[in-house]
Amino acid sequence: QVTLAESGGTLVQPGGSLTLSCVGSRSIFGINAMAWYRQAPGKQREHVASISAGGSTFYRDDVKGRFTISRDYAKRSIYLQMTGLKTEDTAVYFCAAGPRIYEYDTWGQGTQVTVSS
């Protein structure tokens, strides 16, 4: 069982950019799907972006064109590049892994992203 650790969350101004990282405790090669989710205060956790073993990517509509998910097997990591950040992007962001897209059974502890002036 892999464990996941996120990093990179911080305070950023609206319109700014930020890249989150998620590193696995072992190789992520062979994990069929990995993803980023987020949870804002008082709201349910929601899917942000996923990447399949084949490299296909999936995004929620309100981040398309602004966020990019990517993967680096050599570094056992996935990333979430975020641009054009909005106050509504404020949330704790979680990394996840699982057997298929939208079916995740391993979660990191989360990293806080706050978008505010």
Image (spheres, rainbow, N blue to C red):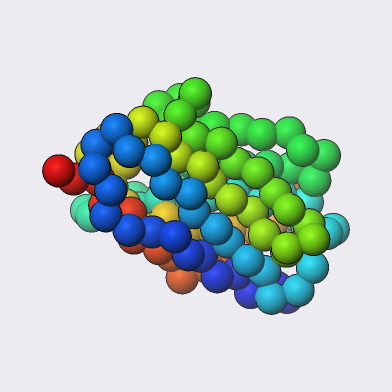
Q: Which residue lies at the image location 80% right of the left edge and 61% below the top edge? A: 74
Where 99 falls versus 111 (above or below)? above
Q: Position of residue 100 (x, y in %)?
A: 72, 48
Q: Which quadrant holds the N terminus?
A: bottom right
Q: Which residue lies at the image location 77% right of the left edge and 38% below the top edge? A: 55
- Numbered disc total: 0
Q: Nearer the viewer, residue 14 or 61?
A: 14
Q: Position of residue 44 (x, y in %)?
A: 34, 50
Q: Is residue 116 left or right of residue 12?
A: left
Where 58 falls versus 48 (above or below)? above
Q: Position of residue 91 (x, y in %)?
A: 31, 52
Q: Is residue 103 left or right of residue 20?
A: right
Q: Nearer the viewer, residue 116 or 60?
A: 116
Q: Is residue 40 left or right of residue 26?
A: left
Q: Which quadrant holds the C terminus?
A: top left
Q: Position of residue 116 (x, y in %)?
A: 18, 45
Camera sees residue 100: yes
Most extreme residue toward the left is: 117
